[in-house]
Image (tube, rainbow, N blue to C red):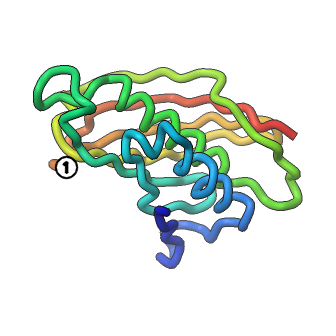
Amino acid sequence: MSAVTTDQPGRLDPLDPLARQWIEGVLAASPIARHVGITVLDAGVDEVRLGLRFRDDLTTVPGVLHGGVVATLVDVAGASASASGLTSADAATGGATTHLDVAYLAVAGSDLVATAKVVHRTRTGTHTQVAVHDADHTLVATASVTSRIFH
């Protein structure tokens, strides 16, 4: 299981146990996230960073990750950022991505890091901006993710 790092003072707020469970136990542990190798690098309220290791079996052509793999990373990052603000008092029962818009800016030819930040939150939904960088810190993709929170 991936670890959630929240002991960086001033960087990210500590997560509620419910948020941690949704991020680690549901989203990062989902069959698709495990299949493509998504891991949680760190997470705090309204901000998460996920990683994805480059693998040849995830490419479209040699050396280039499939765009759907990048979109999957973006989707899981957006959902994780949405879940990061949950508290036990929310009584959330689940969630779903209602809109996903990805702009591919460069070839994804190495390990990736997705940073997702919630820019708007209500009781029933979030809007999140996601930036995906490669191992050389090149911006590979940007995205907007709108998520619904079920109660």
Is 72 on the left-hand or right-hand side of 147?
left
Is 113 on the left-hand or right-hand side of 102?
left
Tag count: 1
Spot occupied by residue 91 in the image (x, y as percentages of width and height)? 88, 51
For the point 17% across and 28% down, the residue is 64
For the point 65% across and 66% down, the residue is 15
Q: What amino acid is labelled 1 in the image?
A: Ala
Is 62 on the left-hand or right-hand side of 128?
left
Whether 23 is drawn above or below 61: the answer is below
* Element assignment for label 1: loop
Spot occupied by residue 74 in the image (x, y as percentages of width and height)? 45, 35
- Image quadrant occupied by the C terminus: top right
Whether 150 is drawn above or below 49: the answer is above
Is 95 on the left-hand or right-hand side of 33?
right
**Label 1 belongs to which residue?**
135
State the residue in front, 92 or 121. 92
Spot occupied by residue 62 in the image (x, y as percentages of width and height)? 11, 27
For the point 78% across and 40% down, the residue is 122
For the point 68% across and 31% down, the residue is 96
Spot occupied by residue 21 in the image (x, y as percentages of width and height)? 67, 59
Residue at the left extreme, as displayed? 62
